[in-house]
Image (cartoon, rainbow, N blue to C red):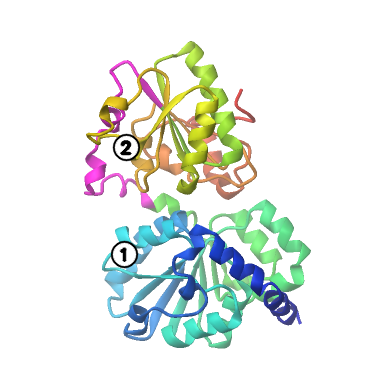
Amino acid sequence: MYYLMYNVLLVLAFPIIIGLLLTKKRSQRGLWCRLGAVPVELRNLQKPVIWIHAVSLGEVATIVPLLQAMKQRYPQWPLVVSTVTETGREVVIKRLEGVAVHCYAPVDFWWAVDRYIRILQPQLFILVESEFWPNLLNRLQRHRVPICLVNGRISSRSFARYRWISGMMNQVLNCLDLALMQSVHDAERIGHLGVKPNAIHVTGNMKFDQGLEQGQAADAHTQVSFRSLFTCHAAEVLIVAGSTHAQEEESVLEAYRLVIAQHPQAVLVMAPRHIERVAKLEQVIRQYGFSCVRRSRLGQDVGDQAVPHGPRVIVLDTRGELAFVYREALVTFVGGTLVPVGGHNLLEPAQWGRPVVFGPHVDHCRDIAGLLLGAGGGLQIQNQD
């Protein structure tokens, strides 16, 4: 009954969904794949495969050590990683080359999902964190594919929403054969939502397994001195605000204005969560009276003479560098925490021993926030003051 209602609603919403896919730049790439057209490189893979679904950059980065270990132990099984976002795709290509093949995840239409399952013939499906798509899980179960949730989490906000549709969620989550959860709280919540008790295990947060691997990588940009690239003189210090959202960026800039009143040698680096927002962020920065420059324009012969000095904002408009920029900061702020998003990766700056400032909205990283506060490595704020 629930699946019938869900699929009727999907069919009715089909024109809207297609319209969104066509108008959003983030969705245009791989559009046919999202609608069920399986890429040739996946068709040519040896079958069966292990299918891993990780929605975006953070989830893919989390499972890199796991997939590398799986490839070493089971080299005969091709690994396919599906993502929703382009940033997730880039992490697969850069950090899992020779380990896994990427594809865009099909939209949750039953016919698109079925097509992927028939062609990939997965012998195991691994779901990362909290992407519970009803048709995807239901069709996998019908095809007798074991489903394992890794690094599972259920935030308090998600739990409250899921309880409103508890009948549907009970059926969806009952498809899970194994649920490996980040914390006891996550385990209790997913149990209340219907997962079989003997399928639930608390295994901790896999983000701790990443360690300094990304900081020790041999990529050329890890050797870059960002202080030099940003033309910082010896007395200047960097404040890095990473993974920021539109609704909190004005708070960050207002806080920076207060800081430079006392410490004019501070330079702010802002890394918006979504790079396509860079132009809008630049407008906001200039409205606050600050000079700004994009990181991508630094180090180029044409633009070197235009690099501003004094209090200024550097906009990080590149991918894959934020973790290394954190390394050179005096203090950091992690976005998605002053707005009800749930927070982003607090461990990225913490792994370098940098103080981490974050807001009240840490649903997605509450345990890590608690550890940082307990160890004196974090400061939780309510606003820019």
Q: Picture quarter containing residue 194?
A: bottom right
Image check: 311 left or right of 146? left
Determine which of the numbered discs, if any, sits on residue 297 in the image.
2
Q: Is residue 233 magenta?
A: yes
Q: Are marks 2 and 1 in contact (CB under 8 Å)?
A: no
- By secondary structure, the bulk of the magenta-drawn segment is best described as loop
Q: What span is in magenta? A: 210-238
Q: SS for tag 1?
A: helix
Q: Give the percent coordinates (x, y) of residue 360.
A: 63, 37
Quadrant placement of the C terminus:
top right
Residue 277 visible within the image: yes
Q: SS for tag 2?
A: helix
The amino acid type, in three-letter code, at marker 2 is Arg
Mark 2 to mark 1 CA distance (whole Å): 35 Å
Q: Picture quarter containing residue 63?
A: bottom left
> Toward the viewer: 385 or 124?
385
Residue farthest to the top, as pictured: 262
Q: Give the percent coordinates (x, y) of residue 284.
A: 54, 32
Quadrant placement of the N terminus:
bottom right
Image check: 164 left or right of 11? right
User: Viewer-nearest of labels 2 and 1?
Assistant: 2
The amino acid type, in three-letter code, at marker 1 is Gln
Image check: 9 left or right of 122? right
Residue 384 higher or lower than 95, as above or below = above
Q: Picture quarter containing residue 48?
A: bottom left
Residue farthest to the front, as pictured: 302
Q: Residue at x 28, y 80 (%)?
A: 76
- What residue is shown with label 1? 68
Q: Give the percent coordinates (x, y) of residue 275.
A: 45, 47
> Toward the viewer: 257 or 284?
284
Q: Is residue 32 magenta?
A: no
Residue 355 higher or lower than 316, as above or below = above
